[in-house]
Amino acid sequence: MQLQQLTYFLGVARTQHFTRAADELGVAQPSLSKQIRVLEDELGAPLFSRARGNITLTPAGEALLPLANRILADVDTARLEVQELVGLRHGRVRLGATPSLCSGLLADTLRRFHDSYPGIRLLVEEGGSRDLVRQLTRGELDLALVILPLPEDTPLATTPILRDDLVVAARRDDPTLSGRTHLHITDLRDRPLVMFRQGYDLREATLGACRAAGFEPRFAVEGGEMDAVLRFVEVGLGVAVVPSTVLAGRPGLQGIPLPGLHRTVALAHRKDVAPTHAAGAFRATLESFLRESAADGTLPVGVEAVSGRAAAGIGHGS
């Protein structure tokens, strides 16, 4: 099995067309088709169904797809790491983070890292925690800031770095919440909720807390990203459970605490691949930034640095 064959396989899987894949890869279509056949012969199974001109993956192709993606991602990482060591390039960090972190602490950390290592390229992928876990597992990211707990069989190593409180985001002029200094999850029983899309840890946190309290939440609208969810709350569609840090710069919203409801953020990487030197430098920068911010009291309200401590993940209590 050759890396070139895997590249050709992924090209056809992506385009669902042999000729288009050959054009994208800059290779003659007969040569690409021949290498795919050689790969199929070696594996002992067809990878594509070619019925009536429609190119689709067979079960064997579906099984190979995530493995081929991961193999080629690892090869790319290895190439960059070696080039970094011999001085040909300065390196690259592919970092995944949730929208709430991108709009808060992460921006300051990225600035510090860029000032210290201006030659290292920073590629930030924004998404829900579950989406980031899948991307990290497939080798598409070097590091990711994810929400604990992860599944027990995860191939990722995690280090807890901070814990932030969850609050109910509501319009500041909502007369039904006037004077409320805190809410219990049961107070959401009859309120319409603005709900995040699938893949967001906040969706699972909200649903889990409501169900543990014995009720199913009522959705006014669902399927949004962070900015959309907050905007939907601003126009009065409902309330949402969010980290306290995302409400900065939104004067029309208030955050009402939900005592005991929090989430733990961890820095994750794959267990089977050592982080690159550039990724290691970013991790050190992040941990240093959090330690210093905790020491001088500049962490946002509701955020606590927990690096080096055991983490309980999303839940109630401490």
Image: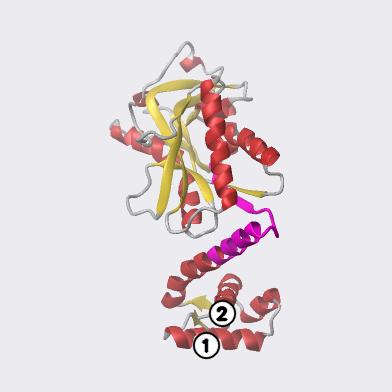
Q: Are marks 2 and 1 in contact (CB under 8 Å)?
A: yes
Q: Which residue is mark 2?
A: 5
Q: Nearer the viewer, residue 277 or 9?
A: 277
Q: Residues within 10 Å of mark 2 (few under 14, many from 20)?
A: many
Mark 2 or 1, nearer chain start: 2
Which quarter of the image is occupied by the C terminus?
top left
In the visual, does 38 lie left or right of 108? left
Q: Residue at x 62, y 60 (%)?
A: 80
Q: Which residue is mark 1?
A: 38
Q: Nearer the viewer, residue 142 or 259?
A: 142
Figure disc tally: 2
Question: Mark 2 falls on what kind of element?
Answer: helix
In magenta stretch: residue 280: no
* Magenta highlight range: 74-99
| Residue 99 in view in this figure | no
Q: Residue at x 42, y 86 (%)?
A: 44
Q: Which amino acid lies under the numbered mark 1 shown in the image of this protein?
A: Val
